[in-house]
Structures are given as C-alpha cells and as structure tokens.
Amino acid sequence: MSKNENARSGRELLNHTKKERCYPTSIKAFNLSVGRFDPITGEPGIPEGTPLEAFGPNASCKSAMWEGLAANIMKMDPKAKVFALLSEDPDPERWESVGIDLDRITIWTYYNPDPDATLQSAEEGLNLLCELVSEDMDYKLTVVDSIKALVVEDQVFGKKAGELKEFSESEAPAIRARLMNRFLGNHKVANKARAILFMVNQVSESIGPNFNIGQMVKTKTAGGREKEHYCKLRIECNSAPPDATDKPVNHKLFGNKIFNKLRCIFFLQKNKFGFPFRKTNVDFELEEKRFANERNCLDFAEYLGIISRSGTSRWNLDGKSIQGRAAAEQYLLENPEYEDKLWKEIYPRHKELYNDKPSKSSKDELEND
C-alpha cells in the first residue's frame, strides 16, 4: 500500500461517481437543471456528499427546497437521518405534511424554554454537526438555516449577569466569515457519512455611496467567500408575484384578492455537475400540502416532443384532446399516474439531449476543420 491510501486512478474515480446516489428535491424542474441522475431510479437530483448554498430574498422557496429534499431522502432510504440547525422555531406539523419522518430528524435551535439557561452559540451547533456526520453513517442531509442568523460566541452573553459583549458593525461580518471558514474546513474532513450540506442564506444590500446608484444595487451574502469556493452548487432563488387574473379553484374568496399560485425563479450560479448558469422558472399550485403541485410537466413534455399541442392551447394528452392550459393542468392533477409516466419519459430524453454528449478535445476539433 502506498503512503497515500486515498490515491485512486481516474478509472476507479469514474466508477465511484457513477454509483453515487442522487436525491431529488421537491422541485422536479430544478432537479433536471443540476444534470446528475440517480443510478438506480434514473431520476435527477443532488449527489450525496454535495455542499450547496441556496440564497435569496424572503419567501423564495429556500426552506421549501430542503424540506422536500429531506422527505425524498427518507422515502428512498428507510435508515436515513437528517440534522437541522435552525434559527427559528420548527414547525413539525408542516414537516409531517410534506413527508418528513419526525423520528429521524434531529433539531438544534437557539430557542430554549428555560429562562435561566444561557444562550448557546453557533460554534456548538456546527461542532455537533461535524461530530454527527463523522460518527453516524446514517446521516444523509445536514441543514444550516440560516447563515445570516448564526449567533457567534462574541454575541453570546449570560442572562443572569446581563452583560453584553459589544462589537462594531464592521467586525460582525468578519467574525461570521471566520466562523464559516473554520466550519467548512472541519466539515470537509469529518464528512465520512457523505451527507449533503444544505446551507440557506439571505441577501442584503451593500451600504455605501457607490453601491446604490440609480437601479444598480450591489448585494452580498453573509458568511464570507469561503463558502462560494467550497460549495459545488450555488442557487440564487427569487420569487415573482402570480398573475393578476389567476383565481383559486374551489375556494371561497374573502377580502380583496387571494391567489393560490406562486412563481419562483432558480438560477444556478455555480454547478460542478452540469451546465452552470441555468435558469429555471417554476410555477407552484398552493394547496394544503406545501407546494404539492408543480405546473411544469406540460412545458418539458412539449419541448422534448413527448406530447403535442395543436394551435395555441389544444393539448393532446393520453389520446385525448383538451382545450386550454388550465384544463390540461387539471387533467394531470386528477390523473397522477399519467403525470408520473410523463416525467419518467422526460428524464431519459433530457439526459440523452443535454447530459450524454461527449466532449471534444482541441486536437479533434482541429482535425475536423
């Protein structure tokens, strides 16, 4: 055995990456944008052991993404566990409606019902995360929600003494950046469980005389730049208001306007598994379950030539001619088996067109010219 036991040939590494499991999120259109497919189920998803960051403004489906990912991981692996480092009070009822097994999720929050207890720091939660993924191989997902709300040791004070350690506003970003730098270095070594690290972050505006000129507003994310280099996926999440003509179906209206649809935009700023800078527009149907209905199956199936559309809005689905997009979406909602069949046809077709093209070397291009 050589001195470096971790050294492997390129062929061995290629065979290892082909056997990696990929876990899908609840957003099927985004899963296709990642560009990696599970070797067993054939569905697209996020490979195991992937560190990723989802950042964006408020109400842009960041938390909904990791909740759906946790539910799918528990569905695919009956022994899988999830660790969540949260900055707010958890909502078990919503998690259970999404499909998360409450017995297999470990929660660490800053919320403590004991008024005499001292506040716990972010260092303790991040160290606990590294210990879990190094000792227990069943942890498949770890969540930090969110980086912006991490309470570092310099902000912790004793409730009994009532003494607060003060530091200037310029020191706060640097302290949080050093914290994330140490954590990511430790996590890289300790992640023996090959768990997915899902980091949620917020976007804030840079304050200064040269940053807000006209419509050009410079934004930044908390945690420094170390996470940008460490992450293999960086997702910019945004939400757009629904159409003003959209009205809920089978709902009674009270007040001015009530909408039951949401449009989100996911932009892959960094992607180590496929094409970067992909932009995904996703429409959701809001129901009792959180984002249960995704309204993108028709667009993918038509673009890939699986279904046909005659005229402007007459769809040919399952041997039937359906007039109007709303009626076609309602047909897919009432027939989930047919919708699943369409998605199973979309995955291999998309992989054939966009993910299986062999790359040409410069020598081959010169010879062809």
Image: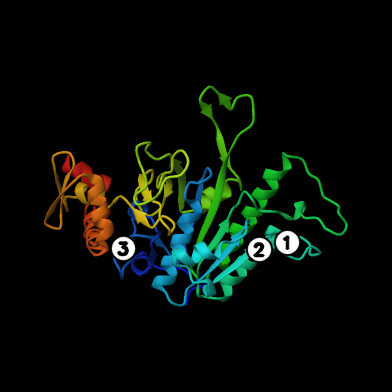
Question: Neighbour class for label 1 at 10 Å: few (<14), some, many (≥20)?
Answer: some
User: Left of 366 or right of it: where is 35?
Assistant: right
User: Left of 362 or right of it: where is 317?
Assistant: left
Q: Are marks 2 and 1 in contact (CB under 8 Å)?
A: yes
Please report whichever mark, 2 or 1, sits nearer to the chain's N-terminal start.
1
What residue is pinned by disc 1? 120
Q: CA distance from mark 3 to mark 1?
A: 40 Å
What residue is pinned by disc 3? 43
Q: Is residue 216 visible?
A: yes
What residue is pinned by disc 2? 125
Please report whichever mark, 2 or 3, sits nearer to the chain's N-terminal start.
3
Q: CA distance from mark 2 to mark 1?
A: 8 Å
Q: Are marks 3 and 1 in contact (CB under 8 Å)?
A: no
Q: Position of residue 253 (x, y in %)?
A: 42, 45
Q: Amino acid at mark 1?
A: Gln
Question: Neighbour class for label 2 at 10 Å: few (<14), some, many (≥20)?
Answer: many
User: Left of 321 or right of it: where is 328?
Assistant: right
Q: Amino acid at mark 3?
A: Glu
